Amino acid sequence: MPPICKTNLKRNIGSKANARKIYYLLEGNVTEPRFFDELFEKTNFVDSKEIRIIKCEKTKNDRGASNCLSMIELAKNYLKNKKDFKKGYDKILIVFDLDIYKKDLSRLINCVREEKDVIFGFSNPSFELFLLMCLDKNFIKNLDSKTKENIIANEYIEKDRFIYYLIKNDYKFDSKNKKSDFLMIAKNIENAFDQK
């Protein structure tokens, strides 16, 4: 599956009325919404003549939904009342961490294959790794083998997972704090795309 980027999403159609609609639904309740809200609302990452970005808001009952199947069901339920959703043209973007599938990737693969109007955005093992790559354009290149092992394992250090601990302590960015400057990170999204 290709990475999420502008070229995967856009269509060259020339008018706002014909813009492809991308509905997005996020697993997280703080970090991912803050990042994507800043990215889509306050940067020029997408051209509104090519793509219209629409957030799928979770209700109180949906806040705990984090596995792929429940996220797809949430997206489908949200779109049932959207008469202007064009199947085969408009898309639903679902973003979640792969850490919940460590033991059963086959279930995830089957889930992804069945959905034609859904674009899946996976972060592995957590979204904070993607944020680190936005913050530091040489993050992956400069990793030593021990840090790579710790990232993959993403075990707890003190009370935090390793990647969250790393971004909070080494980069002085608290991704769980609603007051953190996510716009600064969103403006540097190309740093992450340039790293493999």
Image (cartoon, rainbow, N blue to C red):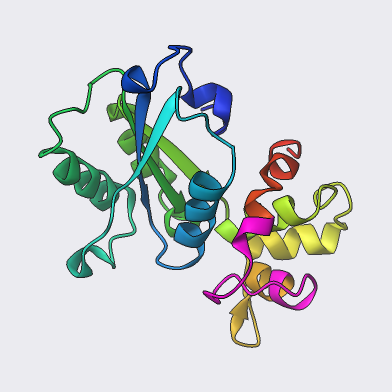
Please give the name of the residue rendered at 46% of the width and 16% of the height, measured from the top-left corner.
11
Taking depth in this image into account, of 164 and 55 the one nearest to the observer is 55
Q: How many marks?
A: 0
Q: Which residues are the magenta region?
A: 167-184
| Foreground pick, 6 / 161 | 6
Q: Residue at x 31, y 25 (%)?
A: 90
Q: Is residue 74 visible?
A: yes
* Residue at the image point whose x is 24% and y is 52% from the top: 70
Is residue 24 magenta-colored?
no
Q: Residue furthest top?
A: 13
Residue 126 visible in the snapshot: no
Q: Where's residue 84, x and y in %?
A: 18, 27
Question: If the image is split into quadrants, where does the C terminus sit?
Answer: top right
Which percent across, then down, holds residue 141?
86, 46
Magenta segment includes 169? yes
Where does residue 54 sit, x and y in percent of width and height? 34, 42
24 with respect to 176 (left or right): left
In terms of secondary structure, what is the magenta stretch mainly? loop
Please tell me whether residue 181 is drawn above or below residue 174 in the rendered image.
above
